[in-house]
Amino acid sequence: MVPAQTYSDSTVNYIEIGAFGGSGSRTPFWMQANQFGTIPKSSPAATLRSGFEKYIRFGSHKNRAKNVWRAGFGIEAVGNLTESSKLLFPQLHATLRFKNWEIFAGRKKQWVGLADSTLGTGSYAWSGNAMPIPKIQIGTIGFVNVPFTQGWLSFNAFYSDGFFENNRPVTSGLKLHQKALYLKIGNKYSRLKLLGGFNHQVQWGGKSPYYTKDGKLPDGFKNYINVITGQRYFLGDDLTEFDYNNRIGNHLGSIDLGIQYIGHEYSWFIYRQNIYEDGSLSKLLNIADGLNGISIRKNNSYGANFEVSAIVVEFLFTKSQGGSVWDLETVLGRDNYFNNGQIRDGWSYFDRTIGTPFITPTSDTNWKWPGYSDSFTSNNRVSVFHFGFSGTFLQKIQWSSKLSYSSNIGTYDEPFLKKPSQFSGIFSVGLSLDRSGNTAIKASYALDIGQLYPNAKAFGLSLRRDFGFRSPVGNKKN
């Protein structure tokens, strides 16, 4: 007899206190990147943070036993004491779940795309570098089996709409449209699995002083349909020539492919993210651009005094952009990633890159060009070699490291006079202070050496206590 499916909701509830500081007034890259915008860019700083999430099951007695219907909420607060102290809420949401589906409203931490989200550089379009954007989203929780395929085909998908902050440098009232669909071939017993899919993000609506009618970007339901489909060449009284020749809003995303192999001793994940912002990818003009990665994880620990349990190697390249020539007829080439002619403050949220942190805000670097004084980034043509490691030492100490080397050449419009290179690294160790592993102390050392950022070194120390509040746990379907 096949056991009844039971659905689980794991949560993380914690309180943490920490501080960091070092040479210079800027926090090193890997100490603040991909931290959902919660680590300040200035140093030194102290932080106090806490998170709580809870799901309650309801419905008939049978459904409650299997945890089919659940309602939950979550809140995470981060208080940073630095030269510009802030209280942030990276998570604040209400959620309704049915089996492996959910709908939520508010802020919730997410990673989008096929990539290693722990030791890698982060997905190209949605990396976890910025604060989560408030939105309403409906979608799956992980991969869900397609009916009548006996588990050989599954999908992970969502559809959402949200809004950006009002106090942006150039625009105001911007909206977010976002969706994604990923497929996986291979059941839970398969050693080899194939994955593929896409994500699509659009900034639209609101106000901008650039290439608009009366300072307003196209809005309303008919334009929302054009935002969803990404179609071009249509007319409207509220449209400019810029809208006609491009699309309604600032579109971007990636088309991803992945291969997963689960062996006896190691698990392998090889992935590729192909970049699109206009039609260049459809003509394969910018096929050289993208994120390439391989993640290798050890399936078992043998209790050695020193172990490497995971290795991630990535190469990010964004220097092609479809070539240096922009063709008005096809609107191809010179893609200018994360910048937009109407939405000059670009693919950002509270001055943080929403996508890969290696496409840097102009305000963050040593290289500031007058022509990009009101554009988001003056450096979107980059190549990055990255290595991530994690493991154990003396069987009790958890350690991890990220090491990245980048070459930066600016943009096609204003190339850097030189090609500043940059090394950024971090090394962290953590030790559990009790048998349960719920209380831990963590120390980190990070540094930046190169020409892109001011040279900096910093040391961080934190103490964290996790609390276990869990709904009934069963076999989660993948």
Image (cartoon, rainbow, N blue to C red):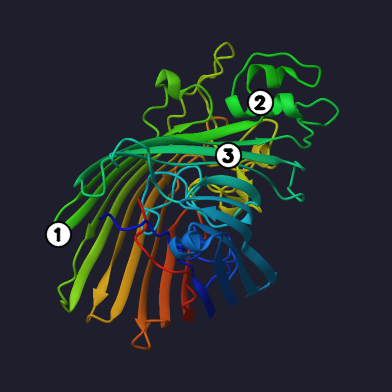
Can residue 208 be seen at all in this image of the molecule?
Answer: yes
Q: Is residue 26 above or below residue 115?
A: below
Q: Position of residue 171 (x, y in %)?
A: 75, 41
* Front-lying residue, 353 or 367: 353
Q: Earlier in the sequence, mark 1 or mark 2?
A: 2
Label 3 belongs to which residue? 178
The reply, left or right, for residue 105 in relation to residue 322 is: right
Q: Amino acid at mark 2?
A: Ile
The reply, left or right, for residue 357 in relation to residue 6 is: right
Name the residue rendered at 47%, 79% in the picture: 466
Q: Amino acid at mark 3?
A: Gln
Q: Position of residue 336 (x, y in %)?
A: 55, 32
Name the residue rendered at 31%, 75% in the picture: 398
Q: Which mark is residue 231?
A: none
Label 1: how many Cα within 10 Å (few below 14, some 14–19, many 20+): few
Q: Amino acid at mark 1?
A: Glu
Res. 247 image quadrant: top right
Q: Position of residue 428 (x, y in %)?
A: 37, 72
Label 1 belongs to which residue? 265
Label 2 belongs to which residue? 225
Quadrant including the N terminus: bottom left
Q: Position of residue 165 (x, y in %)?
A: 72, 50
